Image: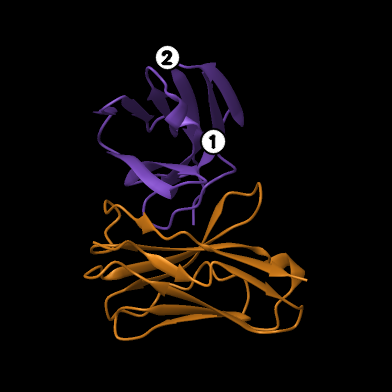
Amino acid sequence: SQQGEEDPQALSIQEGENATMNCSYKTSINNLQWYRQNSGRGLVHLILIRSNEREKHSGRLRVTLDTSKKSSSLLITASRAADTASYFCGVDYKLSFGAGTTVTVRA
Amino acid sequence: GAGVSQSPSNKVTEKGKDVELRCDPISGHTALYWYRQSLGQGLEFLIYFQGNSAPDKSGLPSDRFSAERTGGSVSTLTIQRTQQEDSAVYLCASSLAGQSTDTQYFGPGTRLTVL
């Protein structure tokens, strides 16, 4: 199955700042999904963007998709301590993630 | 309602032994997935069940790995003659209908350690 690759590997930000991470993939897709994983809640689905969409919002999350560049970005605005986690992207339904982006939000 | 549950939460075994990992999906979900997450290596798809269709086994790394799903609900992942490289967290997920736009709900995982 195709793998999403996240970048950067790690991100450390101050509470209230925005966090941006990127995802790249290799072939055509139907949709792309972002997941979050922390020790308390395991892997949790955040947002899905379809291949015919360019941008999608959900609360403090904003996802963009550029199918010509085979890339997506996830923006978390006004970050909170609870956003400290690893973030992964996966394509279609046979999800395969890279090592993820580890986000640390400092108080 | 209850989420996806997996058992055991931790399993330590000796190289060469067989192990069985269990997954109870969310009630009513027709699709069930098994994944493996190795430290620092992301998530790897293993196998996918959808209703009564033949499972998609394209992600199984070797013939030592097999899975079954009984009665369209509970699933068991079996690893025969375990090797040290099988050490990982094995995650199960379920979704309502198995479509690519469905949200997959993950269980807490089984951490397998092969000594």
Q: Amino acid at mark 2?
A: Gly
Q: Secondary structure at mark 1?
A: strand
Q: Chain B's colour?
A: orange
Q: Secondary structure at mark 2?
A: loop
Rendered residue at 26%/27% (across/down)? A59
Disc 1 versus disc 2: nearer the observer: 2
The percent position of residue B66, horizontal first and vertical second, equals 53, 81
Rendered residue at 50%/31% (across/down)? A84
Can residue A69 be seen at all in this image of the molecule?
Answer: no
Residue topped by disc 2: A16
Which chain is home to disc 1?
A
Where residue B85 sits, quadrant-wise, is: bottom right
Rendered residue at 55%/34% (across/down)? A101
Say yes or no: labels 1 and 2 on the same chain: yes
The percent position of residue A13, horizontal first and vertical second, equals 54, 18
Q: Chain A's colour?
A: purple
User: Mark 1 to mark 2: distance in Å?
Assistant: 22 Å
Relative depth, front residue between A40 and A3:
A40
Which callout, 1 or 2, points at the residue further toward the start of the chain? 1
